[in-house]
Amino acid sequence: MFAALVAAATASSTVPPAATVPPVAGGDSSTEALIAVARGASPRVEIAGPGVVVIDARGLTRLFGQEAQVAALCRQQAADRGVVAAVGIAATRTAALLLALDGAARIAASALEASQAVVTVPAGAEAAALAPLPLALVARLAALEAPARPRGRTADVPLALWRRWGLATLGALAALPAADLFERLGAAGLAWHAMARGLDARPLVPTAEPRPFEAACAFEWPIEAIEPLSFALGRVLDPLCARLDHDGLGTVTLQTTLRLVTRELYVRRLGLPMPMRDPKVLRTLIVLDLESHPPPAGIDVLTVTFEPVAGRIVQPSLLARAHPRPETIATLTARLRAVMGDGRVGSPVALDTHRGGAIAMRPFDGPATGLPLAVPETPPVPEHDAAGAGRLTLRRLRPPPQVRVELARGCPARVRSLEPRRLPRLGAVRQSAGPWRSSGDWWRPGATPMPRAAATPSVWQPDPSVWSDEPATAWDDDEWDVVLESGTALRLARDRRRDAWVVAALID
Amino acid sequence: MQAARLHIEALLRARRLDRTVTDAGAPSDPVRAVTTGLPWLDPRLAGGWPCGETSEIVGPVSSGRTSLLIASLAAAAARGDVAALIDTHDTFDVGSALAAGVRLDHLLWARGDPAGAPAHVLLERAIKAFGLVLEAGGFGVVALDVADVAPADLGRLPFTTWRRLQRFVEGRDTVALVLTPAPVARSARGVTLELTASTATAVWAGQSRRARRLTGLALTPHVRTARRMQG
């Protein structure tokens, strides 16, 4: 025995093909109300479409009385929630749905009182009860069933075809011989024929009740350290991750809520680069995060919440090079951040600027997994590589150390370090090339305007922001490449605004 | 005497503590080598950097050591490998790396903070980070840049440090590279590439004084290995 509940407003509207996908909880309010009514009556509930719910009503008569009473109770509870619904009860799911759809359509057309929209059909009388109903109901039912139908098996028969054949009711369609229908229309014709007779093409498929992916653990004694907390985390995360695994899901955020002995809530939220469900990885990430940001007091209750999304499906390739797994990268970068500091681990990013040494970082996610990597074009090898020379490679000094430069005929002749701890040995210049002028960012609002020329030399303290990852100030430098007598090659930069020299980089 | 020697060798072999005196670890096994990124240098290293071993690039400032390191990272990117650079003193230059062909999205960069910690703390953190990356596995090249660390500070590290790090990389398709001012870290079947700096290493282009520019450094490598190159 099945009971179908159809919201009247939804039934009156034309259901577009895209709307035939079963909604998730939290979508349409009338659907949510019907789901609540259905779940109050039976644990086996199928959401057949927007505003359409089917209940497995077997055994409900022992709880609520006769079928008519069950149907009336469902309609009344829906009305209490503000939804005008039609209810159909029949021995087959299809018959119940067709009866409820018909009732909802008649309510919407004001051809039926809402209180009368309850139809109960005894077992074996489905065909007779469905016979006078309009054929358009089967078209609506076929649209509702389309998502659950196996791929390639369509039940799409144009309604106009039946009308051309002179058919208007389900009874007329049911009276046609099935074999002839199959010859003319194939499997789709048979599917319509079965629906018109109230036969089920598939059983009821209960829609799983959404459960929040959240677990908590209360402690008898407050936990003060992270290490014992990691054991509790294991107990909390293992069942949650097992559920994710069972449902084919992963989580993209990890929220750890700690209720402290001070009655305050301490919340840490971690974003993951991609869906994960390995409890060891998730525990490591939470522990590392809490070690970096420890709670201010002892912990009374631990709660972990996941935000589930579809699981990541990866097809490893025999041809592509194996890379670290995303879980490994996430754990590794978290550990590295704990060692090197926040903002010191990631992938370098080249900025769109001519400022020397300007850099930015982004999180390191690794290359795309499972796909063959496109090998980039190798830069042309300079001719002198054949003789053993490499390219001009710099080692940036951040922040750049100050030096004093003596000039001879406009060229650097001797370099003295003003920071001997960083640059102990400099000296006479043997060869030099330059200057190359470089300036920029003077157009940015808030940037330091460039004076025309520095009138007098002054001791200049290097502006750390000039060499930071996100430079925002103007620069105006002359750069020289010099080789000292010791063989050390340097890139010197003279700030034209202040007439001060720094070692921008070592050439190595 | 012979029995004692055999006993010691057996112990070394059993605990996999040495592969130069004994034949522990089957030294006859072929070592897979990957290119350094400088084709003229690979034949001198019997194919390139040995995988599963710790190799060193040793040299003073302006010897071309960083150029070689960047070339190796670029070669890893060309192979489709993921690389990691532990940059103890935050000296990595993105422009140089891009020009050499390093794929930045394939590079994990861990930067030290020289302004925020004393030298020995920087070194400890870098060593720890190096170990973490090697232990994680899956990287084609993992480089530790301690070129700006004083040799005395490197010498104060416990003797077991480099052996422990070598254990992480053994048997894997990973090249562990250490850029250092003095030889300290090479594993038994690894390579030490010593470079020297002089005014002659600078390569200039341009005829006139105004057109002259520094285009690179000529590398003068001296290769040191334990046994692999001797055959």
Image: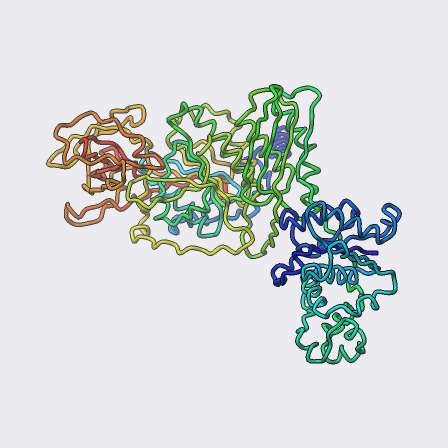
Q: Quadrant of residue B145?
A: top left
Q: Which image quarter holds the N terminus of chain B?
A: top right
* Placement of B208 over or under A477, stated as above or below: below
User: Is residue B225 visible to us here?
Assistant: no
**Total label count?**
0
Query: x%, y% of residue A146?
Result: 68, 63
**Foreground pick, A209 / A390:** A209
Q: Is residue A226 above or below residue B27?
A: above
x, y percentage for residue A488? 27, 35
Query: Can the viewer see residue A165?
Result: yes
The residue furthest left is A409
> In the displayed structure, does residue A259 sit left or right of residue B147?
right
Q: Quadrant of residue A375?
A: bottom left
Tell me where residue A100 appears, x and y as whole percent: 75, 59
Of A177 and A491, nearer the camera is A177
Color theme of the render: rainbow
- Please tell me which residue lies in front, B74 or B52: B74
Q: With A138 as the anchor, is A325 left or right in this view?
A: left
